[in-house]
Image (tube, rainbow, N blue to C red):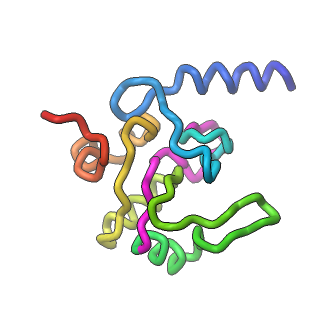
Amino acid sequence: MEAKTDREAEARMEAKNALGGPLEPCSMQPLTGYQRDGCCNTDAQDRGLHLVCAQVTQAFLDFTRSQGNDLSTPAPDYGFPGLKPGDRWCLCVDRWLDAKDAGVAPPLILAATHQKALQHVSPETLYAYALDAPEK
């Protein structure tokens, strides 16, 4: 188990964000990430690709609930407090794209969005929704 933990820690340290720098935490409160490490890290078991760090909005929370993924209702058995507008959360890249297509995509934090998101979303689209897009 220790070797796996060491490999996971090393992978987190090497992870890059959508800006090309080190992947920054998305949220520690509430604790997010597929690996529940506060970062939008991923691995082979992450079939949902929780790559995108978003600052959720009520419109997004309503949309995702309508799609069968209720992120606003607490689930104490899983240590999940439920999200409220303004919380940051690692979203599945496809769910974010669905929300974008529906006109309710929440804004992103590029420094905390995994670089692998760029395999699914163009840099121009990510930057258009980013709260931390660099000035051109």
Q: Nearer the viewer, residue 72 or 50?
A: 72
Task: Residue 74: give x, y in percent of width and height.
Answer: 69, 70
**Residue 9 horizontal side relative to residue 70, left or right:** right
Q: Inspect the magenta stretch and tell me whether residue 25 lies in it.
A: no
Residue at the location (34% across, 69% down)? 104
Q: Please provide the residue range marked out in magenta.
A: 41-58
Residue at the location (48% across, 71% down)? 61
Q: Residue furthest right?
A: 1
Q: Inspect the magenta stretch and tell me whether residue 49 lies in it.
A: yes
Residue at the location (61% across, 44% down)? 28
**Residue 36 horizontal side relative to residue 110, left or right:** right
**Residue 88 horizontal side relative to residue 135, left or right:** right
Task: Residue 71: give x, y in percent of width and height.
Answer: 59, 68
Residue at the location (40% across, 35% down)? 111
Quarter of the figure with the N terminus? top right
Q: Quadrant of residue 17?
A: top left
Q: Nearer the viewer, residue 34 or 133?
A: 133
**Residue 119 horizontal side relative to residue 30, left or right:** left
Q: Residue furthest bottom?
A: 66
Task: Residue 98: give x, y in percent of width and height.
Answer: 40, 65
